Amino acid sequence: MTSFLTAVENTAFATWVRESSSLLAYPAILFLHTVGLGFLVGLNAAIALRLLGFAERIPLAPMVKFYRVMWIGFWINALSGTALLAADATTKITNPVFYIKMGFVTLAVVNMVLIRRRVFGNPSLDLSPVTGGAKVLAVLSLVFWTGAITAGRLMAYFGPVSGAPGLKNRIP
Amino acid sequence: MIQSFSTWLHSTRLSWAVAGGIPWIWPLCETLHFIGLALLMGIVSVLDLRMLGMAKELPLGPLQRLMPWAILGFTINLITGALFFTGDPTQYIHNVAFGFKLLFIGLAGVNVILFYVTGLYRRVDSVGAGHDVPAAAKVAAAASLILWIGVMYWGRMLPFIGNAF
């Protein structure tokens, strides 16, 4: 396992991501990961808040169109996340917090698909009040994404030291 | 002046606490900073994308009622950001990326203020389902998206272009 992770880390691409001094390497990929987060989690939160009764006069049905942007955000982060993982494979795969983050991301994405099917799949969506079930999914969306962000942030503080060389992301 | 202010700030007990004196404060603030980012970007992008023509069936008036959540996200980030600065002022005051980040936040703020004081807010508020917002509002929406993405860019570049962690 360790030799496989070391091999991944030593591929030309992973080495470039980690060690290149170019702003297009680690810095740009980390930036893309943040933009993807902003759109994916942000739009999920906006939909969840509406389901929970805030800005109640917004018709829900047209909000389904934001799923396209949410999926773009998801794929930006799946790809940028894979690159960041490859760059630091040995330290990230052995970090327990990484699995907590992936667990929350999986739950959050499954939940997002459930909202798409169960809530937006209802043809009479805006003709009746938001159901209790939809509100539960909305609360779970906020909880799962908050968990994913928290675990993602804390990966820099628990487990083996990771991140680009010279990036001081731990408290001295 | 900035130098002596940051020296004083760094000597405070709060600065000591944030910079690792109380070890969980920095990671907690970072986490909150990203939650605030998501909240702000989510609401901003719903409004801006709608003004740019996406999900046109959404009436703008009700949509603008989501603004308090964007303000909450911004406030969380203003407070946590101020705490980062307090924790280690010297890594920000000579940091080019930090200067640009503040500039972009300022420009995004000017954009919001112009949106309100020019009366664009009221004109947009009455735009119903299926209708286009005035061209000026589309420009403001595009500027808003670009500026906030720029804020994220400069924030992320703090350790790479500048010297912050």
Image (cartoon, coloured by chain):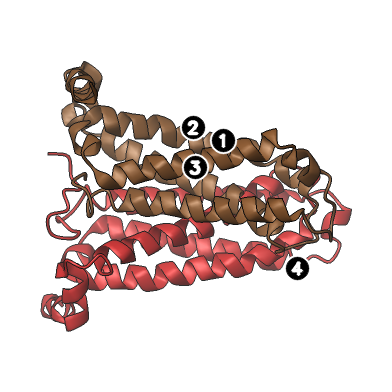
Chain colours: A red, B brown
- Label 1 sits on what residue type? Ile
Asked if marks 4 and 1 touch (Cβ < 8 Å), the reply is: no
Q: Name the residue under label 2.
A: B75
Q: Which mark is residue A121?
A: 4
Q: Name the residue under label 1.
A: B71
At horizontal 77% and vertical 53% (from top left) the residue drawn is B134
**The image quarter in which residue A24 lies:** bottom left
Q: Mark 3 points at which residue?
A: B107
**Residue A17, position as x, y percentages in the image:** 22, 71
- Label 3 sits on what residue type? Leu
Which numbered mark, 3 or 1, is in the foreground of this view? 3
Label 1 marks which chain's residue?
B
**Residue B61, position as x, y percentages in the image:** 79, 44
- Marks 2 and 4, Cα distance to the nearest angstrom? 35 Å
- Label 2 sits on what residue type? Thr
Residue B110 in the image: above or below residue A76? above
Helix, strand or loop at label 2? It is helix
Q: Do labels 4 and 1 share a chain?
A: no
Q: Do labels 3 and 4 share a chain?
A: no
Asked if marks 2 and 1 touch (Cβ < 8 Å), the reply is: yes
**How many discs mark residues in the rendered view?**
4
Asked if marks 3 and 2 touch (Cβ < 8 Å), the reply is: no
Q: Residues within 10 Å of mark 1 (few under 14, many from 20)?
A: some
